[in-house]
Image: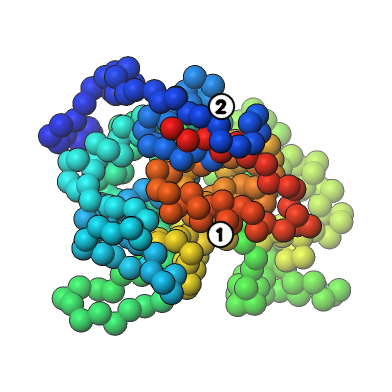
Amino acid sequence: MIITYDNKKQEKDIIEKTPRIDLKTLSGKGAKNKLIHADNLSSLKTLLDEYAGKVDLVYIDPPFATNGHFKISEDRANTISNGIDDDIAYSDILVGADFLEFLRERLIFLRELLSEKGSIYLHIDYKIGHYIKLIMDEVFGRKNFRNDITRIKCNPKNFHRKAYGNIKDLILFYSKSENSTWNDPRVQYTEEDEARLFKKVDKNGRQYTTIPLHAPGETTNGNTGKEWRGMKPPKGRHWRSDPMLLEEWNKEGLIEWSANSVPRKKIFLDEKDGKKMQDIWEFKDPQYPQYPTEKSLDLLKFIVEASSNEEDLVLDCFCGSGTTLIAAQSLNRNWIGIDKSEQAIKVTQKKLSQIPSSLFSKVEYEFLKE
């Protein structure tokens, strides 16, 4: 399905007619990391010359079409102003079709910048996110959609309105291809998980559970469809492993036999590296942010670790206070950050300068401006 709206441009025109800009280096010439103070659309067009197909991970937290002006108040809390003044960090005034096309233009260039192993995470709210999903399906292909992630952003609110409270926003996760980097992130079991999932204890005091030795899918030619200890897998299933390996497991005491002589594989808690992360995340925003709509550093570090490797290139073209860049730097990734807000660039530079050299490698970046 392709979404239609007024003022939607041809993709070819977006790529060919978007102007490049002349980015001038203000400091750090030649550094691998880059912080760009400029309009992100023209900057992305300019970056194509050097970085087409070379960006391994994109995270963006664009405006949410709120029709407001965000500023940094004296106590550093986020406020929304109805007027323009010198404290404005950024304005979020595009709505409707104008906003959709604004974002689509940038997504097209981000797709061109992504490597074949690359992924993109787009952070958006519940009011506009479902429209953006259709645009991302169009730009990146429905087959490359990976997840619609619910992110718990705050504690419950007791607003008086005829609707349920809103404590979440959305992260849309797409890959460039089937060959994307995926490090299968895990989270630690809670005590409740351990008690619920690993109810059994062996003679050595190790907690464990058991799983069937067979899996869906019938095999007629391979060894996993053959008889083991006088039995075959149930109809429509096959052994999870070669019968020779099953016999080794049995000798090592890793198979538990039921009273009805049904074998199951033992899975020990102390051999598991946590449980698979699901698509509901609880990463709450900072209570006292340095910049409006600043996101959790733990959230960004989780994304960077999940979908990139060391020395990969991470890009955020709505970098705001630089949380994505801090996360990438702390995990030994290279990065590019873009923002047109002077307030954002100042906060980002301050945060980069405060990274402890004892914890992370020295921060070196090329600072560019139009």
Horizontal and vertical percent position of residue 160: 20, 81
Could you tell me which residue is drawn at 60 percent across and 77 percent down?
A: 192
Quadrant containing the C terminus is top left
Residue 293 picture quarter: bottom left
Residue 297: image tag:
1
Could you tell me which residue is drawn at 20 percent across and 73 percent down?
A: 163
SS for callout 2: loop
Quadrant containing the N terminus is top left
What's the distance in space between the residues labelled 1 and 2, CA to CA? 24 Å
Horizontal and vertical percent position of residue 315: 52, 39
Q: Which residue is mark 2?
A: 54
Could you tell me which residue is drawn at 64 percent across and 36 percent down?
A: 28
From this view, report whether residue 64 is shown above or below residue 164.
above
Q: In the rendered structure, which amino acid carries the disc numbered 2?
A: Lys
Residue 99 picture quarter: top left
Does any portion of residue 343 appear in the rendered image?
A: yes
SS for callout 1: helix
The image's colour scheme reads rainbow
Q: Earlier in the sequence, mark 1 or mark 2?
A: 2
Quick check: 220 left or right of 266? left
Does any portion of residue 109 appear in the rendered image?
A: no
